[in-house]
Image (cartoon, grey):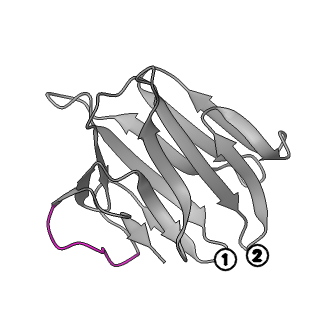
Amino acid sequence: MKVHDHFVVRLGGRDYCDTPNLVVYRGAPLLRLSRAPDDELEVQAEVFDADGHRKAKVRGTELVEGDPDAIDVRSSENCYVIRDRANDRVVCEIRRRAGKQKMDLDVSILMHAPDGFLIHANPAQSNVKPLHETLLVRGAEAAIAL
């Protein structure tokens, strides 16, 4: 999925520009989005189960740690998905926003933190209190922090 220089991510009812760390747990990123030199979206994710055990590390579409039968990663021109095969749960879905802002991205997550807490966020809302009051956030350290 190609992205432009300062792509905007919509998560939890806020728009984030130049905020690569979408989910941070105790200072360590669990979900990070950036732009690779070839303009492709670069995703880095840590996937945990409900007991706080790390199931996988994902870099782009590659599973760099974990059981390849447990996690499915797919990417297309307009969508990127990490799915936990054990419970058929979509852990992370990134979609290109339709309409005039087609280069911007909508993000939905249903992922566990290392302490087992289930983070549920989509483009409109989140079960975690937002760190920022404004609807457009630029250059923040994180979108969601636990």
Q: Are marks 1 and 2 in contact (CB under 8 Å)?
A: yes
Residue 90 included in the magenta stretch of the image: no
Image spot of residue 73 (x, y percent): 65, 36
Quick one: label 1, few (<14), some, or many (20+) residues within 10 Å? some
Is label 1 in a helix, a strand or a loop?
loop
Residue beneath disc 2 = 51
Within the image, what quadrant is residue 127 found in?
bottom left
Residue 132 included in the magenta stretch of the image: yes
Residue 1 vertical placement versus 112 (above, below): above
Residue found farthest to the front:
37
Left-right relation of 82 to 34: right
Left-right relation of 125 to 114: left
| Tag shown at residue 105 | none
Residue 85 vertical placement versus 120 (above, below): above
Residue beneath disc 1 = 116
Q: Residue at x 78, y 52 (%)?
A: 86
Q: Residue at x 58, y 46 (%)?
A: 44
Instruction: Give the magenta-colored segment's residue range.
Output: 128-135
Q: CA distance from mark 1 to mark 2?
A: 5 Å
Quadrant position of the N terminus in the picture: top left
Residue 116 vertical placement versus 69 (above, below): below
